[in-house]
Image (cartoon, rainbow, N blue to C red):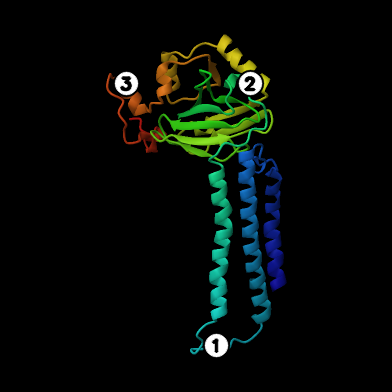
Amino acid sequence: MIKTFKMKMAVALLPLLALLTGCSDNIAVLNPQGPVAREQYHLIVWSLIMMSLVLAIVLIIFIYVLVRFGRRKSKGFDPNDTGNRKLEIIWLIVPVLICILLAVPTVKTLYALNQPPKATAAAPAALNGSKTLTIDVTSVQWKWLFRYPDQKIETVNYVVIPAGIPVQFRLHAYDAMNAFWVPELGGQQYTMTDMPMKLWLQADKPGNYDGRSSNYSGRGFAQMTFTVMARSANDFDNWISSVKNNQPALTHAKYMQLLEPNTVKPQEFSSYPAIVAKDFNKAQMDAVMNGESPEKDSMPGMDMGNGGKGGQK
């Protein structure tokens, strides 16, 4: 009977193997292309090792109990049995040790990632002597705005960075809460109104890396993607010069259009109006447009209702 059951299970599970043909070995999270992603990758591997160890021990004990005691007749309940002190100590200490082995490297990594990675290339001339690049990121439904405060340019739905140079992304949301994620370069970080967040990333070598939102924010969520283009120092300098010399300025009217909830193609601008650098959220911008004071509000972007329009009414 057991053999018949095993045969039925094998026949039932065999078609599921066909699903494996749709799997890919190109998993971005497991393909780190920068020091930040690499640290997080090592943490993932360490966690998997610990979990596999726990699973292996549980399965070994499970099989041992089945084989050792499965065919024996039970002695029944012993009312005088007070337990096994040694076993109780073991199954108390082991989980604590596992938690420590997971917590210590996790905390160390988290603190380490709050600091800029070590540069592995010469800084471009466009950084004006700085060893890091700062980019202000604004999530808007359903697009990403990238502002280079030192270079005074702006891009939409794509960002260019110098390879081998630490880049600090200063994140905030205009409307709905979102999440900024470039899997091959590092973990995700939330964007929220009135709560600036920071994220350090760095690319090992020139290349294009896919980025996207990892927090559902309404009907245009699937199109809320962007590209991180890592370039050599010379190419980065040339790109900055090209944008400054050949692209139009971002006007106030165009900026207000970008703040509308829609999807757009990648764009670049040679300069931007002063209001862009104020990082207003929607409620504050509405107040400014109505001639009122842009006071801090109660974080409208945290509202995920209203059809995914955040604080929009």
Q: Residues within 10 Å of mark 3 (few under 14, many from 20)?
A: some
Left or right, 124 with respect to 265, comes to right
Residue farthest to the left, as pictured: 292
Secondary structure beneath label 2: helix
Mark 3 vs mark 1, foreground winner is: 3
**Residue 181 in sight in this render:** no
Q: Quadrant of the N terminus?
A: bottom right
Q: Residue at x 44, y 15 (%)?
A: 254
Cα–Cα gap, marks 2 and 3: 36 Å
Graded by Cα atoms within 10 Å as few (under 14), some (14 to 19) or many (20 or more), the crowding at tag 1 reads: few
Which numbered circle lies on residue 288?
3
Amino acid type, mark 1:
Gly
Residue 236 marker: 2
Which residue is rendered at x = 46% and y = 36% of the image? 197
Q: Position of residue 213 (x, y in %)?
A: 52, 35
The one nearer the camera, 274 or 16, is 274
The answer to whether mark 3 and mark 1 are in CB contact below 8 A is no
Name the residue carrying label 1: 76
Number of dots carrying numbers: 3
Task: Give the residue type that dot 3 points to.
Answer: Val
As drawn, 62 above or below 144: below
Give the residue type at disc 2.
Phe
Q: Is residue 170 visible?
A: yes
